[in-house]
Image (spheres, coloured by chain):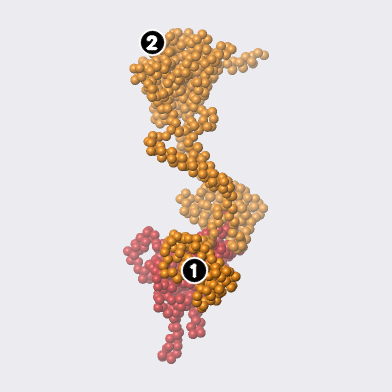
Amino acid sequence: MISLPLLVALAAAPPALDDANNQAREVLARDKYGYCHDPKYPLTEVEAGWCPPVGPERNARCQTFPSACKAPRSELLNPGRLDFSRGDGGDGKTEGGDRDPDKSTPTGDGKPDGGNSGKRKVPKRLVEPEPDPFELPPLGGLGYAIFWVILGAGLLLIIYLIARNSTRNKPDEAEPVPPPQDELGPAPARDDHNEQLARDVNTLLDQARAAASAGDYARAIHRAHAALLHRLDHDGLIRVAPFRTNGDYVRDLAQHQVAQAELRREVRDIVRDVEQAQFGTTRPDASLYERVLQRVVPIATRRSAALLALLAVNLLSCDTRNYPFDHSPSGADAVIELAGRYDITIKFRTTALADLDPDEDTDADNRGRTLVLLHDAPFPTHEEWAHLLEWADNGHHLVIAGRHPPSDLGISHESGAPGHDLKVSSAFSDRLGELDLITADNNYLVPTHSDGTTLLEFAPGIPYAIQHERGYRGGDVTVFADDRLFTSGALMLRDNPEFLVRFLRDLDTREVELADGLLDLGADTPAEAIAKTHLTPVVLQLLALLAVFYFCRGVRFGRPRDPPTRSRRQFAEHVEALGHQYARARASRHAVRLYAVWALERLREKTLMSRTPGIYPLAQAIAGRTGDDENRVMETLVEASSLRDATSISATTATADDLRLMQDLARLVRLVGGPR
Amino acid sequence: MTPQQFAEICTNIRTQVGRVLLGQDEIIDNVLVGVLARGHVLIEGVPGLGKTLMVRALARVLGCVAKRIQFTPDLMPSDVTGGNIFNQQKQQFEFMPGPVFTQLLLADEINRAPAKTQAALLEAMADRSVSSDGVTRPLPQPFFVMATQNPVESQGTYPLPEAQLDRFLMKLDVTHPTREVEKRLLANVVKGFDAAALENVGLEQVITAENLVFMQTYLNQIRVTDDLLDYITDIVARTRSHRSVFLGASPRGSIALLATSRARAAMEGRDFVIPDDIKTLAPAVLRHRLILHPDAEFEGASADDCIKTVLNEARVPKTAA
């Protein structure tokens, strides 16, 4: 009865610690770790640092890694693993928390490091501060003035446009009225074939089959024909439109380079049969329908198959292998998976180091948490280092893997250790065992005034990792010369996996957090995300543009509108255009004179005074017919007559008198019967 | 005669004429449509594009008699139709037939003759007979006129009135050949081709004049569905309501479009007309029947533009769209 729970418990129990190397082999056997399965895996230069330790022979845990070492290197930037030659650390004698690149490199306690600064390489993160998106380039005094003037004018224009259009309350433009059908004559008769057809090929084929089943072969042939055309339309070979004929479609195919001659011939033959049924003397029947359908269906399916094949070829021709950074030898995914098999939870820290609570207590079992600062983690500031050390004093475990530790730990980095082989020091051998390790680089630590205990060493006196016990609550700080042992690549070799598991188990931690380059890069709000991507000015400009567009147009977005119907230009528009020509030529007086001559002639004709000389009889006749005041009529006629008889007319712009005279003459002409 | 036989004959005609007239396949096709549809064709194009050569080649291939009239400002109507001449031996007037009494007539640069002479020819074209001194004399069968006019030299010309233009079944625009075609043409000349000596080319006579008349009558058997009559009506009606057109195509235009569509269908080996026949021939049949508004012409619109717009608006019968 008790055997079953016992078996379940045994099955759920973590594997033995000395089986960690086999566990690592199982982990690396998974396909996602491409460097163990793809002989052409593109290693970065940093990852290729594992090649000498692995050697040219086939590796038991990662079989293809030696082949990958011979493959071309990745063109990607190195993912940031520790390489002191790449500018992160220098000798590590000094390291500090001041992020100001302009100042001399500070020491851990904030003081300049004096003569050591020449050897030290400042992290890139400190060298290149994030640019301020609102910072202007150096333009000079005049440049700044012009810039601000243009910007101010633009803003004023925007405000003016918005205000003007807000107060104008412009109604939407009226929809253009389509011309009445009467103008076009009676619409052509439409049979059931001219109804709105579906555009989906399969639907049309189904409709064709259904119509054939119902005995309506004319309809069935029409649908099959439509299916063919829409298939070719979908493939971009033709363009189906109500005004296009089958001949147009065949000519489309002839012009299309992609279309083969065989396809053109087939389509032409099908179309001929369809037209025979539609316009010829042949009555559509089952045999004709079958003949059409048998040729339409293969084309439709073949086109689809061809497209699928083309897509497949495209997909295959592309390098679809995707190796995320986490699955690479520089990543930590395999490490996390291996630790998970031993019930050790490892996750990446996402919040800033500053958010770490230095007063955080251990849990009820007096187990603290572990934070591993990987090589590409943001470099802590003075305050952050102080927080971290204080946090460790409260019973937590701080692992500094590749980051230069604060100066008060008394440890610096050096490179050039003899070989790559590592041993567990005698101080830890009873806890971790006699393990045989290897690392990719030859970085080592130099304890200047450290009171820590060597954890790993290349040789006596050349430590690779040093552990400092902190406080009285079981906390500690462990400094590694680099973070190679915390990467997936380390699991390929010797007892590295077992050391990793034993080390983490020995810390007796309830949780392990990895701090890498993505630390504190997330955004809490959309606005922060935009600001971090330096898109704030662009987004603001787009919003301003949208506002201007909205208020200028005064039309709701997305409203469907038919294109305006072009109407023939009105006669009045031609007259207006002619008037503008006269105005541009400063010939308004000339135009008034011509109009006066014409109007006087019309008035004489209408009042039958053509043969009577003089203006006065004409004025009398007009006044008598229209009832106007005779004097006023006389004034108008005299003015027109004097203009007519003028020997020269000076060029001038239009005056109100000219316009009034023309209006008066036009009114008189209209009153006596119009111009015709 | 079956549609296939009809198409085979037409293909042979096209092949034979195409041997001497390079790169003008569309013109040859349209001229043949005009011949079969018992119409007359007006060709607009600059000199030297092979119009005379085409008529001569066509006459030889069709087994017809061909004549050519060069229209000039001093050409008299009687120079075209012929007239009564006093025969001193017989002491009576005798009718001397003019060059219009032929089967294929090339009226070269028709717009250079005065209106009276043009009218004489156009009357003969319409009535297929010539009336002189109260006597009406029928013209030979078949009777086909291919008139040409030069679009660039307008000085000293008498443009054909629209009413007379309407009597032409089709108006074709001839353009310069492409470089490749012109090079082939030159290569033929290098090999000894002489346009003045067509007998040396070895053109084969495909049919006789009687066969041609029979083929013309055969077109009456070409089927036209009611949908297609609607389509023709729709196209022609739209030319009348087009915003740029002052005067649209007349019912004669509709009839011409029907006749030419039938001819094209037969040439393609069909005994029925399809929409593509109508749409393809509409520009050639309608372009000289439209009078545009002056403002539209100022704006650069042409009859072909209007017809293209109309064809892009008229719904094709039994379309799959």
The residue wearing badge 1 is A640
In terms of image quadrants, where is residue A438?
A: top left
Q: CA distance from mark 1 to mark 2?
A: 121 Å
Mark closest to the chain's N terminus, 1 or 2: 2
Q: Is residue A222 left or right of residue B70?
A: right
CB under 8 Å between discs 1 and 2: no
Whether A554 is drawn above or below B130: the answer is above
Secondary structure of the residue carrying numbered label 2: loop
**Residue in the image at 43% along x and 67% along y:** B44
| Closest to the observer, A103 or A319 | A103
In terms of image quadrants, where is residue A652?
A: bottom left
**Residue in the image at 36% along x and 69% along y:** B195
Q: Position of residue A181 (x, y in %)?
A: 61, 60
**Residue in the image at 61% along x and 15% along y:** A9
Query: Which amino acid is tagged 2?
Result: Gly
Apparent colour of chain B? red
Q: Chain for mark 2?
A: A
